[in-house]
Image (spheres, rainbow, N blue to C red):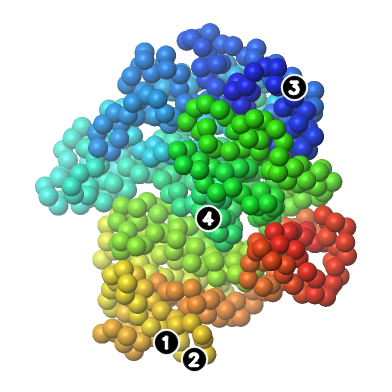
């Protein structure tokens, strides 16, 4: 298993390099990522390339058996490039061009920037294609970060019009799709079509959605420009990119993942107050973008910080977060960064080593795990997470909700997480999938808030239910077509008959308003089951009522229904609810679909499984600060300690078992 660090030798005197390599090897590291922000070092002036320093750094690492992932440096262009071609600078939604001096400040559509990109990537690829230490590439860095997903420059304007011409074929079709009769926007020439600049009023929703799609495609195309060069010159190397999570929803990540060998991502738990469920959700999303295992290319190894500093990872956190990533399908862990830099904008973003480069607590924790992985990593790599429950994430829907959230406190990712967390707490693995995935491998498919509903998506879900599957839909399903127009028929639009229900009325609630939910079979619950944010009053057309509202003018009206259709069932949840209500719903779904939790554990103890064929690796992680008793199903062996465990065993705080 690869286990490494993001290393910037160019930030340190060359005399230090052998010490770094030695200390890395001592910590069990066998990989570094290099060069991803080193363009000016690699091409100090136009077309003069200098790889000598990087070659020497790699030699020291190679002497210690450390392999290399090279980053292409296109997230931070040299000053000389921007000085010669200021038109490569990105333009913001308010029409202002950004300035040089940060990163991610260029337009990826710009033909000039693409020209320079091609040149540096070709030069690097040609130089390192046969290097025995180099195993793969990370393209650029975090596409879309720092509000860079969309650019509003002249080059983008022109490219957008071409993109629209290819999509719609004719202006008539475009005018119809966007409803340009509204406010007299009918276009008679492609040159008349504007970009959705930020203004007092929102742009036409059809235009806005297409611009998001276009901009996402433009990022994917910029990545592909580099992928193609690397595939041609370095056919034996892998190609990846480091994605983001924590609710980032500016680029279609299924599309971005398609051209890569695998997805990588950057995990900084402390930025989210290290909520283990959020971290699990992040890993699950990342595994979903390609439906495959992934790498963590930047794993937090010290306090994050730019101008102010976040809390330190507590003892045991770095190792626990790393094992949690592995538990969810990570096949490699790479820490950001090897040593905290003494200069530049990230002086306070702490790495494994502090500014002074001496080994301390965090180094020894990384080393402990490094030694463990040297023993057992080989048994884990490549094994797969097999979930029986799928959660559909749809990028058109995400984009459309970014444009019109419908309710000020609605967020699509956060909403999906409500369901995810209910399964997470029961140790039931979930996959994030697109609606176009093969649904047959799942016993239960959740499609919450599938707002932009195409006829193809509706047909697939219908076919899945017909053959015996269970699908859950909820609020705002089918409210929009693919042009971001509101559906004409009663909601939930194309799946109304599948759900056996129509939405009589919807009610967008104010921030502190809640509505009691009354379940059909009453239970004694210590917590109130409540709806908030959004309530739809349902009118069953054949569906059975599971839950009713217990307040507002729709008191007594249906809130949740279930419909038998073909050999399967469609559940419709008309409200956004609090956690106890989802817990209750999920219990019913689990018992009706026969999906079993991996293990029953106390709160704060997470369980996942990875499968090597028939062989199961059970990961048990104690995220709490106290010992936890876990009852095991039989005798199991912990790979980490070799201990045999059975009955009720005690897992120490922040500790991990990998049971076989
Ligand atoms: C990541 C980024 C790194 C570094 C790190 C710390 O998001 O990929 O290059 O900036 O954050 O700020
Ligand atoms: Zn642009």
Residue 350: % across, % down: 58, 38
Q: Point out the tag, 3 or 1, that comes first from the N-terminus.
A: 3
Residue 18 image label: 3
Q: Nearer the viewer, mark 3 or mark 2?
A: 3
How many labels were placed on the picture? Answer: 4
Q: Nearer the viewer, mark 3 or mark 1?
A: 3
Q: Which one is nearer the viewer's eye here, 606 or 46? A: 606
- Classify mark 4: residues with Cα within 10 Å, few (<14), some (14-19) or many (20+): few
Residue at image position (76%, 31%) is 23
In the rendered image, the vertical position of residue 197 relative to residue 633, given as above or below: above
Residue 522 image label: 2
Q: Point out the tag, 3 or 2, that comes first from the N-terminus.
A: 3
For the residues bearing labels 1 and 2, Cβ distance under 8 angstroms: yes
* Relative horizontal placement of residue 319, taking residue 281 as reference (left or right): right
Residue at image position (45%, 48%) is 248
Query: Residue 586 sits in which quadrant?
Result: bottom right
Task: Measure the C-alpha gap from mark 1 to mark 2.
Answer: 7 Å
Residue 273 image label: 4
Residue bearing the label numbered 1: 518
Task: Measure the C-alpha gap from mark 3 to mark 1.
Answer: 67 Å
Q: Nearer the viewer, mark 2 or mark 4?
A: 4
């Amino acid at each position: 298993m690869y286990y490494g660090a993001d290393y910037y030798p160019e930030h340190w005197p060359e005399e230090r390099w052998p010490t770094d390599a030695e200390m890395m090897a001592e910590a069990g590291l066998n990989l570094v990522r290099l060069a991803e922000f080193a363009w000016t070092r690699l091409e100090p002036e136009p077309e003069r390339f200098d790889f000598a320093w990087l070659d020497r750094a790699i030699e020291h690492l190679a002497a210690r058996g450390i392999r290399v992932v090279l980053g292409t440096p296109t997230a931070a262009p040299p000053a000389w490039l921007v000085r010669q071609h200021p038109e490569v600078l990105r333009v913001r939604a308010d029409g202002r061009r950004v300035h040089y001096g940060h990163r991610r400040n260029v337009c990826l559509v710009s033909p000039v920037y693409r020209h320079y990109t091609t040149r540096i990537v070709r030069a690097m690829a040609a130089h390192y294609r046969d290097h025995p230490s180099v195993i793969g590439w990370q393209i650029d860095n975090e596409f879309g970060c720092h509000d860079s997903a969309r650019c509003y420059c002249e080059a983008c304007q022109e490219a957008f019009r071409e993109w629209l011409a290819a999509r719609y074929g004719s202006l008539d079709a475009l005018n119809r799709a966007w409803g340009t009769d509204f406010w007299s926007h009918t276009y008679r020439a492609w040159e008349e079509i504007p970009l959705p600049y930020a203004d007092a009023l929102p742009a036409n929703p059809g235009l806005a959605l297409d611009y998001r799609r276009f901009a996402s495609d433009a990022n994917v195309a910029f990545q592909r420009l580099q992928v193609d060069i690397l595939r041609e010159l370095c056919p034996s190397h892998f190609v990846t990119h480091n994605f983001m999570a924590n609710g980032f929803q500016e680029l279609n990540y299924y599309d971005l993942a398609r051209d890569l060998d695998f997805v990588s991502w950057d995990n900084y738990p402390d930025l989210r107050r290290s909520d283990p469920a959020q971290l699990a959700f992040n890993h699950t999303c990342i595994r979903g973008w390609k439906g495959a295992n992934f790498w963590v290319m930047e794993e937090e190894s010290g306090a994050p910080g730019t101008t102010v500093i976040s809390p330190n990872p507590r003892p045991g956190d770095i190792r626990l977060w790393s094992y949690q990533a592995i538990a969810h399908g990570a096949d490699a862990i790479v820490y950001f960064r090897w040593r905290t830099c003494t200069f530049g904008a990230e002086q306070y973003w702490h790495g494994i080593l502090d500014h002074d480069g001496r080994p301390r607590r965090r180094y020894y924790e990384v080393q402990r795990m490094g030694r463990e992985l040297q023993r057992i990593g080989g048994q884990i790599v490549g094994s797969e997470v097999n979930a029986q429950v799928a959660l559909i994430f749809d990028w058109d829907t995400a984009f459309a909700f970014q444009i019109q959230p419908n309710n000020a406190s609605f967020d699509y990712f956060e909403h999906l997480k409500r369901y995810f967390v209910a399964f997470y707490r029961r140790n039931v693995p979930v996959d994030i999938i697109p609606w176009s995935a093969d649904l047959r491998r799942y016993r239960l498919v959740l499609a919450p808030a599938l707002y932009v509903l195409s006829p193809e998506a509706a047909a697939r879900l219908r076919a899945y239910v017909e053959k015996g599957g269970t699908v859950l839909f909820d609020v705002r399903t089918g409210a929009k077509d693919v042009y971001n127009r509101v559906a004409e028929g009663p909601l939930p639009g194309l799946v109304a008959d599948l759900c056996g229900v129509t939405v009589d009325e919807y009610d967008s609630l104010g921030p502190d308003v809640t509505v009691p939910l009354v379940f059909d079979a009453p239970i004694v619950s210590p917590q109130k089951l409540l709806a908030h944010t959004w309530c739809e009053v349902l009118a069953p057309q054949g569906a059975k009522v599971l839950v009713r509202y217990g307040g507002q003018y729709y008191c007594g009206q249906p809130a949740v229904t279930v419909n038998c259709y073909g050999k399967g069932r469609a559940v419709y949840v008309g409200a956004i609810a609090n956690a106890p209500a989802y817990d209750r719903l999920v219990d019913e779904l689990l018992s009706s679909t026969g999906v079993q939790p991996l293990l029953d554990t106390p709160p704060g103890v997470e369980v996942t499984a990875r499968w090597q064929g028939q062989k199961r690796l059970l990961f048990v992680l104690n995220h709490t600060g106290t010992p936890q008793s876990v009852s095991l199903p039989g005798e199991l062996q912990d790979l980490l300690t070799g201990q045999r465990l059975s009955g009720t065993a005690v897992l120490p705080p922040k500790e991990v078992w990998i049971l076989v």
